[in-house]
Image (spheres, helix red, strand yellow):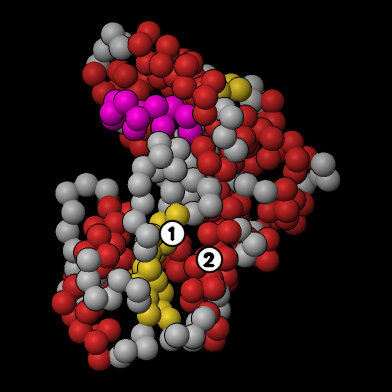
Amino acid sequence: MPNKLRKTINELFADLKNDPKMRIVFVEGNRDLAFWREIVPLHERKDTVIYSISVIEIKVETGGERGRLFHLANIVNDSEFCLRIRFFADADCDRLLERKILANVTLTDGRDLESYTLSESCFEKLWLTGMAGTAGDDKKLLSSVIKLAKPIGILRVVSEKYHKDLPLQRVFEKGWKRFLTGNRFERKLDLKKLMRTLLQLKHNSLREYDELNQTFNVEQVYFNKFDSNQIIHGKDLIGILEVLIGIERKLVETMLYLSLNYDEVRCYPNIRQVSNWITTLK
């Protein structure tokens, strides 16, 4: 949204003063808005509106839209409107690293919004209907995605936990294919190549490889105990699917959300919590 259309925080609070019944849920972006249109249709929202954080004029040094959302949550938490504004955000590593979250923030039940697509029902529709694939291969596809994406997710957690700032976004700009070996659902992740590439890109050196590999091996034992939807990063999920099913990333994302069983998603505890807040009259 262009800056000239954004509201300042003071203007936001003025709107709430002028309309005492108004309540707001802030989300990170347009994909979240589309997601919540399916979860709670407009006609069910009573006095509550859902906005992307992009509508508010607020600056942060790091963290992008999620960082802006959390910054506003802190401001709102100390205001007279703390009970009338809620925030819905990707959990990212916060739950895994046991970080404290403000009471007015609800995190995704899994790692991020894409984690809701990591289900048999979603992959069945994606594969059988979207790709017109062979029955039974949908389960192989889901299993393969989890096998390949979970170690990358753990590596992301390691990077954040130990402040290693591994340039994963830059490394995957050209896709995930060069780190995968084998064919179709039998592909394997070349984790050594991924780690070495990350270190070369960051330091132009491999001097930290042994330390990184040792740290990863220790943390993998611990984090493997968590459900895959807590670990797998949405970008890795989509990028690996791009390789496995052979269609471009943007179409993979579109097909995933069209294949999502929203009735199933509505039963997740954190989704139910926010849905109830939206639909309950005050």
Above/below status of 82 relative to 166 = below
- In the current view of this chain or complex, which residue is farthest to the right? 135
Q: Nearer the viewer, residue 80 or 55?
A: 80
Q: Position of residue 126 (x, y in %)?
A: 69, 53
Above/below status of 247 relative to 210 = below
Quarter of the figure with residue 254: bottom right
Q: Position of residue 279 (x, y in %)?
A: 52, 80
Badge 1 marks a residue whose secondary structure is strand
| Label disc, if present, on residue 106 of the rendered structure | 1
Image quadrant occupied by the C terminus: bottom left
The residue at 38%/68% (across/down) is: 86
**Which three-letter amino acid code belongs to the residue tagged 2?**
Gln
Q: Are marks 2 and 1 in contact (CB under 8 Å)?
A: yes
The residue at 41%/32% (across/down) is: 157
Q: Is residue 46 visible?
A: yes
| Label disc, if present, on residue 41 of the rendered structure | none
Q: Is residue 154 magenta?
A: yes
**Residue underneath mark 2:** 273
Label 2 Cα crowd, 10 Å radius (few <14 / some 14-19 / many 20+) = few
**Which three-letter amino acid code belongs to the residue tagged 1?**
Thr
Label 1 Cα crowd, 10 Å radius (few <14 / some 14-19 / many 20+) = some
First to last magenta residue range: 151-166
Badge 2 marks a residue whose secondary structure is helix
Image quadrant occupied by the N terminus: bottom left
Instruction: Judge left or right: residue 108 versus residue 74.
Output: right
Q: Nearer the viewer, residue 82 or 217?
A: 82
